[in-house]
DNA sequence: GTCGGTGCAAATGCTTTGCATTGAT
DNA sequence: ATCAATGCAAAGCATTTGCACCGAC
C-alpha cells in the first residue's frame, strides 16, 4: 500500500482506512452518488495527511505518486468529504482553504506564532464546554467551531 | 457629515472619528506614508460600518455615496488599516475576506447558524481567559484570536 | 442503459500589480 | 521637487463550471 513508512501514524491510518472508506461509500450511496476509483484514491491520499493540507498540494503529491486525478475532481471530492464529515475546512488566511482529517478525532484548534508563521494544534475540552454554554445562550446546538489564536513568543 | 441617521451608533462614531483619524495619520507618518483624501474617505466609510463588511461592498457603498475611490485603493488602504490595528480581517469562508472595526472594542467572536447563514457576534471574557491559559502553556503571548462557532437551531 | 463522474480548458471572482499621472509633504 | 498614491486595466490565483466522453450501478 501507499503509506509513507517514515510517518508514525501508519497503525492508526491502517485501522481507519477501511471504516472510512465504508463510511464514505455509505455517504455517497445515500446521496445517489458513485464511488469511483478517483474518489478512492483521493480519500486514501487524504488519510495519509497529518494535520493541515491544501487542495493544490494534495494534487501535486498525488501526481508525484502517479495517481492521476484532475484538479476539478480533487475540489469536487474534497467538498463531498467535508459534507460526509470526514474532513473539515479551516480558513487561516484569505489565500486558500486548508483542510484537515477530522473523522473520529477530537476537534482541534490552532495557535499561530505570527512571527514565524508556525502553526501548532491544540485541543481544549474547556473550549468545548464554553462553546456549549455560548450556544445555549443563543438557542443553538453547536455543530462545530474554528478557533485560531495568534501570538508571539513570550518576552 | 456622512453618518446614516438611521443607525444608532452615531454618538459612538462621532466620538471616535477624530481620534482614529489622528491614530491613522500617526501610523502613516511613522511608516513614511501619506494621508490622502481617499484614505480619509475610506476610514470614514469604515467607521460607519457596524459589524462585518467586505471590501467590494464597501467600494459599492462609497460609489453610491459619490465618494469615488478605485478598487485598488480600497484594498491597499484596508491593508494599512489592519496594520494600524484599526480593523481586523476575519476569515469565515474561502470566498473573500471580511473586515471589522476593532479599535478600542472588545474582541468579538462569531456564531454562525449554518441553516440560515445568519452571523451573530458575541463577546466572552471567559474565552479571553482561556486564550491566555492556552498561550501560557505554549510559551506565547496572545496577540489576538478568531473564534467561529457553527450551529443550528435547537430542536 | 442510465445517470453521475471525469478531464480539460475556459470562466469566475477576489485580490494584487504595473504603469503613467496626480498630489501630499 | 520628491516620492508615494491613485486609477485603470491587466495579471494572478484558488476555485468553479460547461461540455463531450467515460464508467459505476
Image (cartoon, coloured by chain):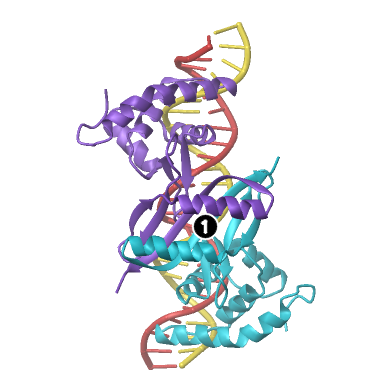
Chain colours: A purple, B cyan, C yellow, D red
Name the outermost residue toward the left: A6
The x and y percentages for residue A2 are 27, 26
Tell me the residue at 64%/62% (across/down): B57
On the image, the x and y values in percent for residue B109 come to 56, 61
| Horizontal arrangement in the rendering, residue A155 relative to residue B24 (left or right) | left
Q: Which residue is at 31% across, 70% downward?
A: A154
* Quadrant including the N terminus of chain B: bottom right
Q: Using the image as rendered, state which of residue A10 and residue C13 is in the foreground.
A: A10
Q: Residues within 10 Å of mark 1 (few under 14, many from 20)?
A: many
**Residue ID at (37%, 27%):** A16
Q: Write down the residue under mark 1.
A: B147
Displayed quadrant of residue B8: bottom right
Q: Where is the C terminus of chain B found, in terms of image quarters?
A: top right
* Residue A146 visible in the snapshot: no
**Residue B117, relative to residue B65: is it above or below?**
above
A29 sits left or right of D12 in the view:
right
Q: Is residue B52 in view?
A: yes
Is residue B60 found left or right of C4 in the rendered image? right
Amino acid at each position: 500500500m501507499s503509506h509513507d513508512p517514515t510517518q508514525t501514524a501508519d497503525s492508526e491510518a491502517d485501522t481507519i482506512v477501511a471504516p472510512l472508506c465504508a463510511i464514505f461509500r455509505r455517504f455517497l450511496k445515500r446521496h445517489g452518488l458513485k464511488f469511483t476509483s478517483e474518489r478512492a484514491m483521493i480519500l486514501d491520499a487524504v488519510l495519509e495527511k497529518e494535520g493541515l493540507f491544501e487542495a493544490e498540494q494534495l494534487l501535486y503529491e498525488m501526481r508525484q505518486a502517479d495517481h492521476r486525478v484532475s484538479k476539478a475532481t480533487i475540489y469536487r471530492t474534497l467538498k463531498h468529504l467535508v459534507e460526509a464529515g470526514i474532513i473539515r475546512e479551516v480558513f487561516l488566511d484569505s489565500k486558500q482553504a486548508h483542510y484537515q482529517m477530522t473523522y473520529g478525532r477530537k476537534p482541534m484548534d490552532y495557535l499561530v506564532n505570527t512571527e514565524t508563521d508556525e502553526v501548532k494544534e491544540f485541543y481544549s475540552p474547556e473550549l468545548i464546554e464554553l462553546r456549549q454554554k455560548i450556544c445555549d445562550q443563543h438557542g443553538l446546538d453547536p455543530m462545530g467551531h474554528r478557533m485560531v489564536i495568534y501570538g508571539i513568543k513570550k518576552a
